[in-house]
Image (spheres, rainbow, N blue to C red):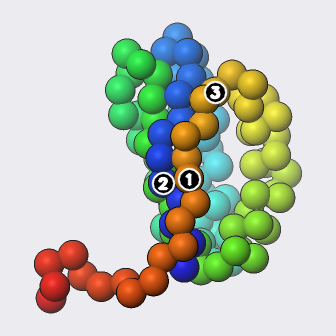
């Protein structure tokens, strides 16, 4: 399993526009074969930060999503306007957080 987690930062004055466009891709991400979880949320409006959290079955599923035209368009428009501190993690040994 692949986990994607971290922050994206944009100019606070542009945060609402960025979040609106990013959230519009959520149904498309969730409909992608291999998407196990996909969510984003505003973290700190004053610093223009948004939290990203995703789970993917494998690298092939993630790569297919990242190659999709709507994802490429989002990065083409916002890539130079954002500081992307989102990272990819390989996950194993999945279990309930309380040991249940």
What kind of element bears circle 2? strand
Residue at image position (24%, 82%) is: 96
Q: Is residue 70 above or below residue 97?
A: above
Label 3 sits on residue: 82
Instruction: Tell me the distance, in whole angstroms, between the alpha carbons under discs 2 and 1.
Output: 6 Å
Q: How many residues crowd mark 1 within 10 Å: few (<14), some (14–19), many (20+)? A: few
Q: Give how far across and how far down residue 16 sits, in percent.
A: 51, 23
Label count reads 3
Above or below for 86 versus 67: above
Residue 91 visible from this viewpoint: yes
Q: Residue at x 47, y 47 (%)?
A: 6
| SS at circle 1 | strand
In the image: residue 87, left or right of residue 81: left
- Residue 7 percent across, percent down from the top left: 48, 39
**Which corner quadrant holds the N terminus?**
bottom right
- Find disc 2 in the rendering and name its residue: 5
Q: Earlier in the sequence, mark 2 or mark 3?
A: 2
Query: 97 or 45: which is nearer to us?
Result: 97
Do labels 1 and 3 touch, CB within 8 Å? no
For disc 1, the marked residue is 87
């Amino acid at each position: 399993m692949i986990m994607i987690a971290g922050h994206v930062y944009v100019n606070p004055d542009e945060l609402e526009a960025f979040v609106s466009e990013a959230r519009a891709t959520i149904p498309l991400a969730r409909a992608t074969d291999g998407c196990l979880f996909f969510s984003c949320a505003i973290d700190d409006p004053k610093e223009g930060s948004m939290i990203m959290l995703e789970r993917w079955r494998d690298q092939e599923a993630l790569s297919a999503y990242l190659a999709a035209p709507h994802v490429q368009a989002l990065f083409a428009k916002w890539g130079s306007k954002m500081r992307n501190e989102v990272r990819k993690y390989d996950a194993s040994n999945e279990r309930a957080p309380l040991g249940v």
